[in-house]
Structure formats: C-alpha cells, structure tokens
C-alpha cells in the first residue's frame, strides 16, 4: 500500500522528536538556561539564544490556541482528508504546536478546548502527533 501524503523527513536536530513520536511519546526540547520548552526542534533557544538544549517528555495535554477548518487544498495527498481541522495547540508546558484536531466533530471545536495528544502511525518510523478532545 502506498503512502499518499508526503512524509516528514527527520533531520539530525529533529530525530529525537520523531523517534519518541514513533514510540507514542511526545518529547520536546527544553532550554536549561531559561527553563522553557521549545517547539519546533532547533539548535538555539528562540527565547534566550542558549545552545544548552535537552530533550524531555511533556504531558501531551493542552488547549486549542487557534484553528481553522480546511475545506479545499491543492496540496497533493491531503485531498482525501477534507475537511480537516488545522490548529495551533498550546501545551500545558507553554509551547505551541501546529497540528490537526481529530476524533472530533468539526462544529464542536472551539478556541480554549482542552485536548490531548494522540499519535497516528504513518510508517514504522513516522507517527504524527495529532490532538483530540481531552480532559482538563
Ligand atoms: Zn532559553
């Protein structure tokens, strides 16, 4: 069976994120200098420019910071997912992640909605962190 949608390509910097995601865990970089979590993976803290970054597990819980409903797309591989919810989720730990909201009716989504991470396995090595309605 072929994969219709394009796949993320882990880099040396993001490898840990994808490895943990494939194990069903959400890990983010954490800055030892300013004590903030960071997403997306990078070599320098965007808050204080420190390079003292570690990887740590996070709760996987957060709230919808903002979202939109995608009804049309010209991105190859995404047509069969329409309509879908494209969102920014603010994690309990403070970082914001772009993601999709799943396992939820489109008209039930709202800003501030409590959500929790759920992983969708695309291949043996790649699982995508999505979010679904959760308890707060
Ligand atoms: Zn920092």
Image (cartoon, helix red, strand yellow):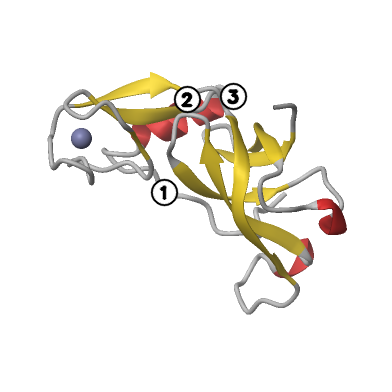
Q: Which residue is drawn at 51% across and 27% down?
A: 26
Quarter placement of the C terminus: top right
Q: Where is residue 51 in the image (x, y as percent from the top left)?
A: 13, 34
Q: Nearer the viewer, mark 1 or mark 3?
A: 3
Q: Gap between marks 2 and 1, in whole Å? A: 15 Å
Q: Write down the residue under mark 3.
A: 24
Q: Position of residue 120 (x, y in %)?
A: 67, 38
Q: Write down the residue under mark 2.
A: 20
Q: Where 102 falls versus 6 (above or below)?
A: above
Quarter of the displayed picture in which ligand 1 can be seen: top left
Q: Write down the residue under mark 1.
A: 9
Query: Mark 3 vs ligand 1: CB under 8 Å?
Result: no
Q: Closer to the camera, 96 or 29?
A: 96
- Disc 3 vs disc 2: Cβ atoms closer than 8 Å? no
Q: Where 68 falls versus 94 (above or below)?
A: below
- In the image, taking residue 33 as reference, residue 124 lies left or right, namely right
Q: Tell me where residue 35 sits by quadrant.
A: top left
Which numbered disc, 2 or 1, marks the residue that appears first in the sequence? 1
| Residue density around tag 1, few if under 14, some if 14–19, many if 20 or more, within 10 Å | few
Q: Residue at x 86, y 59 (%)?
A: 107
Q: Where is residue 88 in the image (x, y as percent from the top left)?
A: 55, 52
Q: Nearer the viewer, mark 2 or mark 1?
A: 2
Q: Is mark 1 on a helix, strand or loop?
A: loop
| Residue 126 seen | no
Q: Gap between marks 1 and 3, in whole Å? A: 18 Å
Which numbered disc, 1 or 3, marks the residue that appears first in the sequence? 1
| Residue 94 seen | yes
Q: Residue at x 45, y 34 (%)?
A: 18
- In the image, taking residue 62 as reference, residue 95 lies left or right, namely left
- Disc 1 vs disc 3: Cβ atoms closer than 8 Å? no
């Amino acid at each position: 069976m072929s994969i219709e949608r394009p796949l993320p390509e882990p880099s040396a910097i993001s490898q840990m994120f994808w490895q943990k995601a494939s194990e069903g865990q959400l890990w983010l970089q954490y800055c030892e200098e300013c004590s903030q979590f960071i997403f997306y993976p990078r070599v320098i803290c965007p808050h204080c420019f420190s390079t003292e970054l570690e990887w740590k597990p996070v709760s996987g819980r957060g709230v919808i910071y903002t979202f939109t409903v995608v009804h049309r797309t010209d991105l190859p591989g995404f047509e069969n997912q329409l309509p879908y919810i494209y969102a920014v989720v603010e994690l309990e730990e403070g970082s914001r992640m772009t993601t999709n909201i799943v396992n939820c009716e489109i008209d039930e989504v709202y800003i501030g909605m409590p959500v929790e991470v759920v992983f969708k396995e695309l291949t043996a090595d790649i699982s995508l962190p999505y979010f679904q309605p959760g308890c707060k």
